[in-house]
Image (tube, helix red, strand yellow):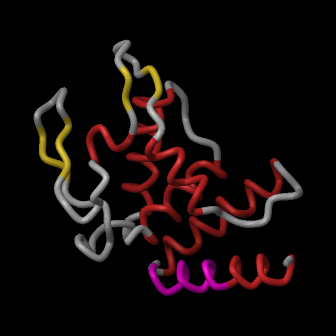
Amino acid sequence: MKKILLASLFVVSCIQAKEFNPQMQEFMNTLQAEAKQQNPSFQGFDYARGEAIFTTQKMGKNGTLISCVSCHTNDLSKNGLNEHTNKVIEPLSPSANPTRFTDVKEVQKWLRRNFKDVYNREGTPLEQGDVITYIINKK
């Protein structure tokens, strides 16, 4: 069973490597190193944890229930809408929007902002890596 889990983690890592440009892969490597430093038993980023972070509702800054899905929708290949600003959000899925996850500074900015909006704090390296893993692998 352990061998299957390790093989699965390796496959996910390979998928990620194919999806990212060198700068984004380096960012993911940094998140992995930071997650491992914070928790020595860290085994890799996880789609299911990322999905839970992305879809679970929390009390937002303005006192209403919010999740990432509130603005980005469950279908990451479609436009979302920020209801507070009434701005359209281009699809998160790299297959629908090839510019997603190509600019590290942009990814860092939006992870920071969105975690603060939904969770009232910055996301940990583990949470950020899990969310990115979920987004790039969601079908």
- Residue drawn at x 38%, y 42% as measured from the top left: 68
Q: Is residue 110 left or right of residue 87?
A: right
Which of the image's four quarters has the C terminus?
A: bottom left
123 shown above or below 116: below
- Does 18 sit left or right of 60 as displayed? right
**Mainly helix, strand or loop, the magenta region?**
helix
Q: Nearer the viewer, residue 109 or 127?
A: 127
Magenta-drawn stretch contains 15: yes
Name, please, the residue furthest toward the front: 1
Report the span colored magenta. Answer: 11-19
**Vertical comparison of 84 with 5: above or below:** above
- The stretch drawn in magenta includes residue 134: no
Task: Tally the numbered discs.
Answer: 0
Q: Which image quadrant for residue 55?
A: top left
* Residue beneath the point at 34% across and 44% down: 69
Residue appearing at x 57%, y 65% in the figure: 27
The location of residue 80, given as percent across then percent down, is 20, 49
Q: Position of residue 125 (x, y in %)?
A: 64, 50
Instruction: Please identify the quadrant where the N terminus is shown.
Output: bottom right
Q: Quadrant of residue 102?
A: bottom left
Quadrant for residue 28, please give it.
Answer: bottom right
Left or right of residue 73: residue 123: right
Residue at figure coordinates x 20%, y 37% from the top left: 82
Question: Which residue is nearer to you in this view: 133 or 29?
Answer: 133
| Residue 58, position as x, y percentages in the image | 47, 27
